[in-house]
Image (cartoon, helix red, strand yellow):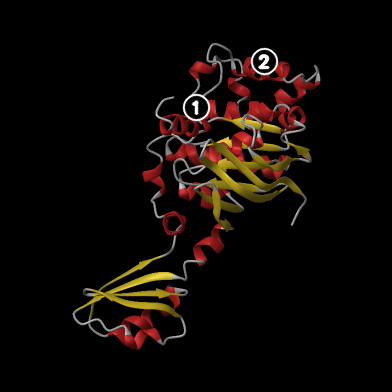
């Protein structure tokens, strides 16, 4: 594994008796695109808030690009860029003026500031619109400008909180292109949260699923899907019988549910013809290949889209704690 850019050991955040992040251990190597997924209130945003020094941990340690988030918070802030879920660009400024303002706030010296702005405008394909007011930009253009702004001070890690939320599918895929380009051309480590499972599957080298403040699953998208045991083949027939299928070497599980024979099969397309022949009188066949949504459901007991009806933030954690105290 490449050199670690984020190292988390026993990281914990409590609000009174409420534990938002519970003794988390996590290592993210340099140059990785890492997805942090979880239900509403699972602790995703609290984790990120601690890593970018917005929130102080109750206990445990974490280092970002070699700097301790508690003892060297000022240095950590120089190592990270953040693209928030809610739009945060200044609509009365042009695209270039937004980048210029951010560069000055971060103390990027001139002419280096001009050089980086020019490079980033090219990177996100906004050169031709750089002098237009940001309020005239489409949703996708605003997102690209925010990504460019987050990279202006050359952070080691870029945190993307729901980077394509609310964008149409075509624009979302365009954003994916720019995210991949950041890693390929600049070697930027990217940590993203998303509730679009296809986005996590397409972009992430590894995914961590967090629930109740703990990492409950951590691996590549391919390995996480493979952990479910194979494809689900459903054979509908008049008199299903699981016994003859249970001993097949490529069948992990066989059970009858009403008129359905439900089989968990490794590499189902390769064995489907044999299964149908063995079953005999089959009325219908359905093959379901495991998805990250299935992994999420198995590990958390919830569908991910059902968990995003409310926001997940450190502020939510504080509000829940306040409410638990009876408003005192």
Name the residue at 59% across, 27% down: 146
Q: Distance between the Cα atoms at labels 2 and 1?
A: 19 Å
Taking the image as shown, residue 166 lies to the left or right of residue 25, namely: left
> Can residue 78 be seen by looking at this rendering?
yes
- Residue that appears at 40% across and 77% down: 253
Q: Quadrant of residue 44?
A: top right
Disc 2 designates what residue?
Answer: 101
Determine which quarter of the picture holds residue 97.
top right
Mark 2 vs mark 1, foreground winner is 1
Front residue of 210/150: it is 210
Q: Quadrant of the N terminus?
A: bottom right
Which of the pair 68/189 is nearer the observer? 68
Whether 318 is drawn above or below 200: the answer is: above
The residue carrying pointer 1 sits among few (fewer than 14), some (14 to 19) or many (20 or more) residues within 10 Å by Cα, namely few
Q: Secondary structure at mark 2?
A: helix
Q: In what quadrant of the picture does the C terminus appear?
A: top left
Question: Which class describes the residues within 10 Å of circle 2: few (<14), some (14-19), or many (20+)?
Answer: some
Choose between 257 and 321: the one closer to the eye: 321
Which residue is label 1 attached to? 86
* Position in image of residue 152 (x %, y %): 70, 27
- Left or right: 205 as drawn, with respect to 262: right
Residue 187: quarter of image: top right
Q: Position of residue 238 (x, y in %)?
A: 18, 80
């Amino acid at each position: 594994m490449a050199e670690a850019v984020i190292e988390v050991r026993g990281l914990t955040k409590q609000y009174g008796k409420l534990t938002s992040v519970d003794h988390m251990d996590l290592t993210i190597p340099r140059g990785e695109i890492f997805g942090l997924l979880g239900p509403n209130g699972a602790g995703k945003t609290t984790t990120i808030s601690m890593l970018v020094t917005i929130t102080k941990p109750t206990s445990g340690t974490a280092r970002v690009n070699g700097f301790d988030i508690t003892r060297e918070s000022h240095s950590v802030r120089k190592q990270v860029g953040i693209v928030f879920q809610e739009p945060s660009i200044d609509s009365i400024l042009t695209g270039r003026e937004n980048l210029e303002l951010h560069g000055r706030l971060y103390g990027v010296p001139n002419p280096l500031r001009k050089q980086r702005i020019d490079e980033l405008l090219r990177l996100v394909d906004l050169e031709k619109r750089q002098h237009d007011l940001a309020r005239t930009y489409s949703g996708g253009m605003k997102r690209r400008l925010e990504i460019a702004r987050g990279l202006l001070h050359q952070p080691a890690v870029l945190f993307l909180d729901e980077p394509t939320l609310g964008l149409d599918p075509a624009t979302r895929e365009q954003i994916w292109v720019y995210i991949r380009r950041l890693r390929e051309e600049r070697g930027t480590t990217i940590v993203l949260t998303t509730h679009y499972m296809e986005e996590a599957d397409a972009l992430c080298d590894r995914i961590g699923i967090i629930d109740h403040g703990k990492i409950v699953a951590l691996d590549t998208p391919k390995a996480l899907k493979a952990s479910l045991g194979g494809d689900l083949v459903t054979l509908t027939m008049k008199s299903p019988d699981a016994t003859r299928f249970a001993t097949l070497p490529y069948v992990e599980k066989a059970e009858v549910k009403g008129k359905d024979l439900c089989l968990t099969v490794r590499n189902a397309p390769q064995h489907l013809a044999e299964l149908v022949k063995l079953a005999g009188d089959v009325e219908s066949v359905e093959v379901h290949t495991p998805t990250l949504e299935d992994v999420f459901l198995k590990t958390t007991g919830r569908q991910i889209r059902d968990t995003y009806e409310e926001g997940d933030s450190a502020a939510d954690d504080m509000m829940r704690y306040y409410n638990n105290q009876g408003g005192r």
